[in-house]
Amino acid sequence: MESSGPPVPSSVWNVASWRSMYPGMWSWVVQRLSAVVLLILFPFHVLNPYIAWLRLAVLALVILHGMHGLKVILTDFGFPARHQRRLLWALAAVGVAAFFALGFLRRAFWGFI
């Protein structure tokens, strides 16, 4: 007879366990990672606000974190599970548009950094 003990949890380093994650879980992971990177980069941005690549990196991470936060809020308030993938892509498109509008187009329209 086989022993029916508790299931063995999959390892973090097992690639198969990462491949089986659904888009909502990837969204959660990306939001948490962006928060950690923001916590690291933001003090450097406060000390050196005129470094262009740092400003763009912080902007990209804030938008990325915000769009995934909106996805979590909409999901918590009952957004249908069958449309989660479309919601993720729609918020990604809004995030890319916001990044280019705030990061690059403002220089052309407003005339300052």
Image (cartoon, helix red, strand yellow):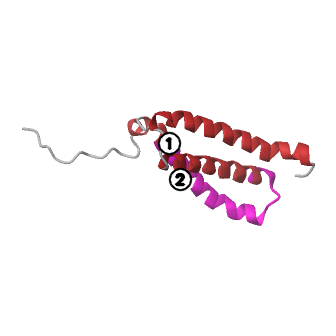
Q: Nearer the viewer, mark 1 or mark 2?
A: 1
Query: Which residue was labeled with disc 1?
Result: 79
Instruction: Check the picture and name the quadrant holding the N terminus.
Output: top left
Q: Is residue 6 found left or right of 54 in the rendered image?
A: left
How many tags in the picture?
2
Q: Whole-Å distance between the Cαs marked 1 and 2?
A: 21 Å
Q: Is residue 49 magenta?
A: yes
> Closest to the observer: 55 or 89?
89
Query: Which residue was labeled with disc 2?
Result: 32
- Amino acid type indicated by mark 2: Arg
Label 1 environment density (alpha carbons within 10 Å; few <14, some 14–19, many ≥20) = some
Label 2 environment density (alpha carbons within 10 Å; few <14, some 14–19, many ≥20) = some
Quadrant housing residue 95? top right
Q: Is residue 108 magenta?
A: no
Residue at 50%, 34% (x, y): give it.
83
> Closest to the observer: 12 or 32?
32
- Amino acid type indicated by mark 1: Phe
- 54 relative to 80, above or below: below
The segment highlighted magenta reads: 25-54
Q: Are marks 1 and 2 in contact (CB under 8 Å)?
A: no
Secondary structure predominantly adopted by residues drawn in magenta: helix
Residue at 50%, 37% (x, y): give it.
84
Residue at 50%, 42% (x, y): give it.
79
